[in-house]
Amino acid sequence: MKQVSKSLLPLLIIGSLFFFMGCGNDTATTDNSNAEPSVEEATDSTVEVQSITTEKLQEKIDDDQWIIVDTRINDAYNGWALEGVTRGGHIKGAVDFSANWIRFEVENQDQLLQEALKEKGITPDKNVVLYDANGEDAALVADYLMQQGIENLYTYDVKEWAMNEELPMESYPNHHLLVPASWVHELIENDNNGNPYKIFEVSWGEISEDYLNGHIPGAVHINTDDVEEGPIWNRLSDEALETFAENYGITIDTTVVLYGSDSTAAFRVATILKYMGAEDVRVLNGGFAAWENSGYDIELEDREKEPVESFGATVPVNKDYIIDLPEAKTILADQEGSKLVDIRSWDEYIGTTSGYSYIEGKGRPAGAVWGYDLDVYRNMDNTMRNPSEIKSMWYEWGITPEQNLSFFCGTGWRAAEVLIYAEVMGLENISLFDGGWNEWQDDSNNPIELGEPN
């Protein structure tokens, strides 16, 4: 029977436990009673390590005794040209271990960081090159690694590598869909160069406590009830979605930035807007915490919606971006070229629980493959996980990028986030099965499987 790969169990643990808590005085404390040094201890000192030249790095980049580590924020790794770097993305072959994972405390942080080091192959027997663009990130990670007994360390300024067009760098084709806080700040500062834009905090309910406690300046709250309805919680009718857009002042050519304290709601609305035909939809990578921890201003003013007369197109423009039950069954019938990918927990997938208080049925659509729960798609700061690691998870279940992939979960929120990540990676034949498990189990004629697959 198909089991969870032992090599991925630590990742599942990491993904399930990581919870971003910020860096203020109210953050969790670390138990210092064990023999391992704490993150706090690791960051109290400054470690000086030798730098490496571009020429030397070129010689060692394919040497399996050397590992290249990008210590910058996730956005830079994905493809954004930040902090004076002339080319966005990362040195080809580099793994990511962001300094932010050390800066911002989380529960069980020491243990989880050490698990991450093992998964990425950052071990004491390797020569480790840590690179950044600001002279701070690599030093912080070097300090932490020295405390973990990893001493063969070198630092490098990636700006030098980026200036030489002949040296290989990798960025993800649609990294622009996930934006750093700095990009949102610049959007506000330059008023999007006079072009229309909107910023929305997205969560369920008419009143959002998160929004009222402070939000990005100019942001308006979106209630997810304005784009979906029960009991299945599918998207609203196309006509109703046009009305939603008009009420919130969204046109087909409006730049739309979505975020939340929990990003799943933002991704849910993002997929619906893209289905509708909105041409420039972005999600703040890492959610509101990314904005707060960048030190940007927040406001308390309750901003009102500013309606427009017309969305500017007949919905849906991108009809195949979201599919329904008949299309999901067609995908299941094509087991070689297509996959219906379940983005729920293992217990939901095998039918131990439905995962929802209002969903009675347990199990999975017969023939659906497990794509792992959402938690393992996120880094500890709730940014997008390294796509190479995502693909490795998929390969365990026969999921490959060239297939026709449709992602689903219970009601479309978790799967929406993975759909956007897949698009960031450059996958093309992808969609969201909107009704997901809730719609499938609602009809007793739909075949269901329970237990671990053979």
Image (cartoon, grey):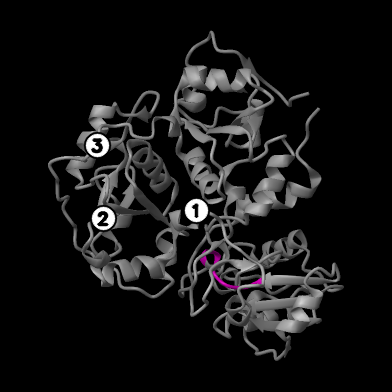
Question: Was residue 71 drawn as part of the magenta stretch in this picture?
Answer: yes
Amino acid type indicated by mark 1 = Asn
Q: Tell which tag, 2 or 1, sits nearer the viewer.
A: 1
Residue 148 appears in the figure: no
Above/below status of 385 relative to 27: above
Q: Tell which tag, 2 or 3, sits nearer the viewer.
A: 3
Pick whichever, 401 or 432, lies toward us. 401
Amino acid type indicated by mark 2 = Lys
Range of magenta residues: 70-75
Query: CA gap, disc 2 to disc 3?
Result: 18 Å
Residue 379 circle label: none
Residue at point 52%, 76% (across, down): 86
**Coordinates of residue 181 in the picture (x, y in percent):** 40, 67
Residue at point 49%, 46% (across, down): 420
**Coordinates of residue 392 in the picture (x, y in percent):** 71, 47
Query: Label 1 crowding class (10 Å Cα cut-off): few <14, some 14-19, many 20+?
Result: some
Label 2 sits on a secondary structure element that is: strand
Q: Which residue is mark 3?
A: 313
Q: Which residue is mark 1?
A: 174
Quadrant in which residue 411 is drawn? top left
Residue at point 48%, 68% (across, down): 22
Residue 116 appears in the figure: yes
Q: In the visual, does 328 lie left or right of 257?
A: right
Query: CA gap, disc 2 to disc 1?
Result: 20 Å
Question: Was residue 326 drawn as part of the magenta stretch in this picture?
Answer: no
Q: In the visual, does 403 lie left or right of 383?
A: right
Q: Which residue is mark 2?
A: 198
Amino acid type indicated by mark 3 = Ala
- Tag 1 or tag 2, which sits nearer the N-term? 1
